[in-house]
Image: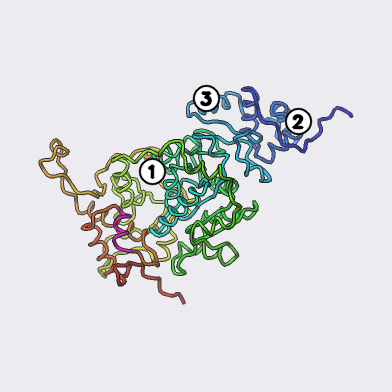
Amino acid sequence: MDGTPQPSTHPPLPPTTEEDRLAWLRLLRSRRVGPSTFYRLMAEHGSAQAALEALPGLAASAGVPSYRPCPEAVAREELRRAKGARARMLTPGDALFPKRLMDLDEPPPLLWMVGEPRVLSRPMIALVGARNASSLATRMAERLATDLAAAGYVIVSGLARGVDTAAHRATLATGTVAVLAGGADIPYPAENADLADRLLLNGARVSERPLGHVAQARDFPRRNRLISGMAEVVVVVEAAAKSGSLITARNALDQGREVMAVPGHPFDARAAGCNLLLRDGARLVRSAEDVLEALPPLPAAQRELALVPSAPPPKPTALERARDMTRALTRGTPVTQAARGAPRGRPEGDARGASSGAIGPPAEGGHPTGPTCTEAAQAGDDAADGMVIDDDAENPTSKGQDQPGEHDVCTRGHAPPGDSAHSDQRQAPPTPEAAALAQARLHAAILARLSCAPLQEDQLIRDLAAPAAQVAPALLDLELADRIERRPGGLLTLVPDPPRN
């Protein structure tokens, strides 16, 4: 032997000391070092410290003479931030590192985990879908998540609006895993910050990005590969033909996972992606039994663990319920956007643009303006999985700000004049512009909940968490505008788009 280091075919040993973890983190955070390069350097040099020492020479031979690895101070700052966030570093070979990720060709060299670590050792099923999910899709996600959790599985998803949110909320008691595109200490979107904190009681937040990193569009496809990689199977509840959920499904197929899909109405563009998956051979899902039939039975210990959570999830406070009701009407649009005087029918800075489903003031013909059924159905699904970043990412000052604004929609009515809540500060009646904006938001929320499949009017009102006296006039407006259709038995549907020539 000539003493030259020989590449190893075995996975690198996990760091065991503070200095080893620091060197591991510095190597991974160094410029131009991704997972593939990281593993190659570790195989060639045997340790992260040795690879760091060799990096400048390797870069110089490649034509980069001034290359410097990640400074030690930067890595120490990330470790300090992790300690403050109570985040744990997980690397391949650690007992808590998700075992399914080791099946990947290039598992993430590092994961930051916040929450209950034991949940990562249990079998997982991924539930993903549309951000602007219909009412039927939301309830389907809740039912699937609840039944699969009762069977012993942990639900993993991406904490996005719509289907992801429904799946996480349904499994707070039994444990759920949220995989984030940004840092594990920065929940995204900001409106799900309360949910992100509540799931830590029995579940966990996981990310491969540095602590403090704000999610960018390019981070979401990488996040999606972790969602599919951690799961036994991937279930797509509702997704458009071009959506981040289909990226997750493609990742699952590349990783050898089975893909399943909930069918949708052919006229509903939000279900087009699921129908395409079914056409191409995905297993059809009608209930949790269809998913469980494709999986081997779990040991009794796993099933019993699902029925005995470590602690019950905290119930939402009155403030959280009020926020949820407001967001149901505003579809997540920050109130600060409206307060700055956004045009009616299209909140300023809305990344979804005209396809958000918002209806503007009546046009000359007397009907509300807005997108077609297909455009409204497709809106937001790409943004849900990172194809578009919405206002929260581009407006850091709005993060975590949930204080009522002057244009907030009141969903429960005002207290009587003599009530103590209004004794010190009386609210002026809304201006015509504010009333028009609130009406447009309510129209948009109704269209987002409806689909081509019939939905009970009572169920719609419950989903919106708004007074019936407020919803009924809006339904009449949409019916006169030929946007929705009433069916016998109190059912509502979207009006299908006219066929294109």
Pointers 3 and 1 in contact (C-beta within 8 Å): no
Q: Secondary structure at mark 2?
A: helix
Coloring scheme of the render?
rainbow
Which residue is tagged 1?
191
Q: Mark 2 belongs to which amino acid?
A: His
Image label count: 3
Counting residues from the N terminus, which is met first, the one under dot 3 or under dot 1?
A: 3
Left or right for 441, reference 8:
left
The single residue placed furthest to the right in the displayed view is 1
Vertical comparison of 312 with 85: above or below: below
Which residue is tagged 2?
45
Q: Secondary structure at mark 3?
A: helix
- Taking the image as drawn, is residue 56 in sight? no
Rendered location of residue 400, percent (x, y): 37, 38
Q: Residue at position x 43%, y 58% from top?
A: 137
Residue placed most toward the observer, 236 or 299: 299
Marks 3/2: CA distance?
28 Å
Which residue is tagged 3?
80
Q: Secondary structure at mark 1?
A: helix
Left or right for 230, reference 348:
right
Counting residues from the N terminus, which is met first, the one under dot 3 or under dot 2?
A: 2
Rendered location of residue 392, percent (x, y): 41, 43
Rendered location of residue 339, percent (x, y): 28, 45
Residues rendered magenta in the picture: 456-464
Query: Alpha-carbon neighbours of circle 1 within 10 Å: few (<14), some, or many (≥20)?
Result: many
Quick check: is 462 in the magenta stretch? yes
Query: Alpha-carbon neighbours of circle 3 within 10 Å: few (<14), some, or many (≥20)?
Result: some
